[in-house]
Image (spheres, grey):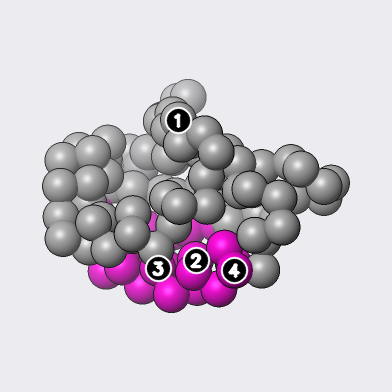
């Protein structure tokens, strides 16, 4: 059963283009992580709204205990976390049946 990670990314206004460039640079870091299955980033349709991040993992542990404890995550943080206000909260969702 795969797990879907969900986060709303509150990018500071005026930093959208720089954030998108940094996300393009950061994307290979997460894609190379064990247990990674897919990634979607959705641009907001309105000004001041957060980006939507959806990452499919083989398990919660692959994200939380694997990627988040890796050197790749430290690089991910360095590239992206400066754009957020506040830092996003992550939720996980599994299959219903």
**Secondary structure of the residue carrying numbered label 2:** helix
Determine contact: label 3, label 2, CB under 8 Å: yes
- Name the residue that disc number 1 marks: 89
Determine contact: label 1, label 2, CB under 8 Å: no
- Name the residue that disc number 2 marks: 23
Q: Main secondary structure of the magenta part?
A: helix
Of the two numbered discs 3 and 1 on the same chain, state the one appearing first in sequence.
3
Drawn side of residue 1 relative to residue 71, left or right: right
Q: CA distance from mark 4 to mark 3?
A: 12 Å
Q: CA distance from mark 3 to mark 1?
A: 19 Å
- Name the residue that disc number 3 marks: 26
Q: CA distance from mark 4 to mark 1?
A: 21 Å
Instruction: Quadrant for residue 19, please give it.
Output: bottom right
**Along the line of sight, which residue is nearer the eye, 84 or 7?**
84
**Nearer mark to the viewer, of 4 and 3:** 4
Q: How many marks?
A: 4
Q: Is residue 5 magenta?
A: no
- Name the residue that disc number 4 marks: 18
Q: What residue appears at the point 16 percent right and 40 percent down from the top-left corner?
A: 65
Region of the chain picked out in magenta, as a range = 18-40
């Amino acid at each position: 059963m795969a797990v879907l990670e969900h986060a709303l990314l509150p990018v500071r206004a005026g930093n959208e283009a720089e954030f998108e460039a940094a996300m393009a640079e950061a994307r290979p870091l997460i894609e190379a992580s064990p247990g990674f299955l897919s990634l979607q980033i959705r641009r907001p349709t309105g000004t001041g709204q957060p980006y939507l991040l959806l990452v499919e993992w083989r398990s919660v542990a692959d994200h939380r205990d694997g990627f988040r404890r890796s050197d790749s995550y430290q690089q991910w943080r360095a590239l992206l976390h400066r754009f957020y206000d506040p830092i996003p909260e992550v939720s996980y969702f599994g299959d219903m049946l």
